[in-house]
Amino acid sequence: MIAMPRRSVTRFFIPLIDVLLLLFCVFLLMPMMNEEELDKKTQSATSLTELVGSLEQELERRNRDLGKFEDLRPQLAELEKLRDELDRLRKERKQVAERMVFKILDIDGDDGALYYHDHVRPGDDRLRIADEKTALQLIARHQREAKGQELYYFFLYPRVESGFPTGQQAKEYGDWFIQVPNSLKRREAVP
């Protein structure tokens, strides 16, 4: 025979109903949580889309710049060669400047007389070179001062055409300074 249970079934259902009610409330609240998360995800997706768009534009701009630089590559190589040559020429110029001593001799436009402007002498710093003896003394003094450097004389012609130096004068000056490099060797005498 079937016996009646000693405990009532309702004692088990009441806590079960509480749990079910709690689960039902959570079920009702779930869509609200999903909407907030969905809004956050939508906002982050929108900001990510904008970020990706700006990054794509930046990448496209940089690719265009890179294309321009690729077109300029031969010119940049040529520029590098020119810079190297310029550095080499500057070094050579410095070596020449260290090796050479330049002296300027002035030819007077009024009478064709030859002068050296001596900045060492106080007062009248203009030394007239009237003969070969004075020229040789000047050369010897400059060679002593040069101390192993090469001496070069540049003859500064008058700025205004005056007919001086005459051909004879230019020949004399060239003969006086023949033992040192000078600019008269490269010029033709004026007759």
Image (cartoon, rainbow, N blue to C red):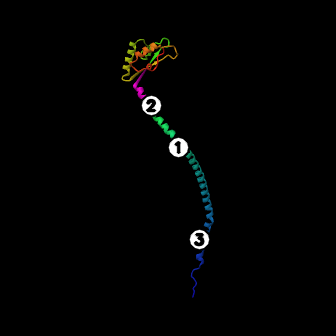
Residue visible at 60% across and 57% down in the picture: 41
Q: Position of residue 96 (x, y in %)?
A: 41, 27
Please state which of the two labelled residues, at mark 2 or mark 3, is closer to the viewer: 2
3D distance between C-alphas at marks 1 and 2: 29 Å
Q: Position of residue 46 (x, y in %)?
A: 61, 54
Residue visible at 54% across and 42% down in the picture: 71
Neighbourhood count class around disc 3 (C-alpha, 10 Å): few under 14, some 14–19, many 20 upward: few
3D distance between C-alphas at marks 2 and 3: 95 Å
Q: Quadrant of residue 97?
A: top left
* Circle nearer the N terminus (1, 2): 1
Front in this rendered view, residue 180 or 84 = 180
Tell whether 26 sits left or right of 180: right
The amino acid pointed to by label 1 is Glu
The amino acid pointed to by label 2 is Leu
- Which mark is on residue 19? 3
Secondary structure beneath label 1: helix
3D distance between C-alphas at marks 1 and 3: 72 Å
**Residue holding disc 1:** 70
Give the prevailing secondary structure in the magenta stretch: helix
Q: Position of residue 177 (x, y in %)?
A: 40, 17
Q: Is residue 86 above or below residue 6?
A: above
- Residue located farthest toward the front when viewing the structure as drawn: 191
Secondary structure beneath label 3: helix
Tell me the magenta residue range. 91-103
- Which mark is on residue 89? 2
